[in-house]
Image (tube, rainbow, N blue to C red):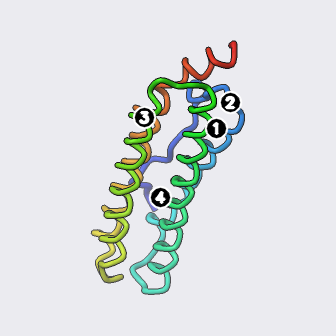
Amino acid sequence: MTRTVPRLLWLDSFQMGIRELDSEHRELFEELNQLMDCLEQVPAGEEEQAALSARLAAIITHHKTHYAHEETLMARRKYGGLEAHAREHRRLEKESDLLFQAFTELPPQAGEERRILALRIREELLDHFLHYDLRYKSHMLDAMGR
């Protein structure tokens, strides 16, 4: 089968220099890759679609837990952009929840529509990392004296 969605590659330049966050970010990337693997392989059967829904729900929950941890670390290191970053987290949580709700309301036979919604969630989460998380990288490193 030809892969239609490329895997996310973790680059060393993504590292924040904070072991906990780097580990969480790598895990989140891998979860998104596993989701895409499922989307590439899963037939439209009801049981498989239920498993896909459960995987997507777990990814969203893991991201929410990560956001809380990230905000705690930002506050500890007195990041000036914390309030705006936290607002973006809340926006992303709402958007992910809405997309997930739409995903679960589609019948299993609507495989392509479900796939598109899952891809939108993936893109939202990836966009956040690339445009928001990497923005505070230098502050966090400076706060640690690096």
* Sequence-wise first label, 1 or 3: 1
Give the foreground label among 4 and 3.
3
* Sequence-wise first label, 4 or 2: 2
Query: Which corner quadrant of the image does residue 120 belong to?
Result: bottom left
Dot 1 crowding, Cα within 10 Å, few <14, some 14–19, many 20+:
some
* Sequence-wise first label, 4 or 3: 4
The amino acid type found where label 2 is placed reads Ile
Residue 48, how many percent across, how many down?
49, 80
Q: Say which element carries label 4.
A: helix
| Depth order, front residue of 86/96 | 86
How many badges with numbers are in the image?
A: 4
User: Alpha-carbon distance for marks 1 and 4?
Assistant: 23 Å
Residue behind mark 4: 36
Q: Say which element carries label 2.
A: loop
Residue depicted at x 34% and y 49%: 91
In the image, 8: left or right of 97?
A: right
* Sequence-wise first label, 1 or 4: 1
User: Alpha-carbon distance for marks 3 and 2?
Assistant: 20 Å
Dot 4 crowding, Cα within 10 Å, few <14, some 14–19, many 20+:
many
In the image, residue 114 sits, relative to residue 32, either above or below, namely below
Please say if the residues under marks 2 and 1 sit with CB atoms less than 8 Å apart: yes
* Sequence-wise first label, 3 or 2: 2
In the image, residue 22 sits, relative to residue 142, either above or below, namely below
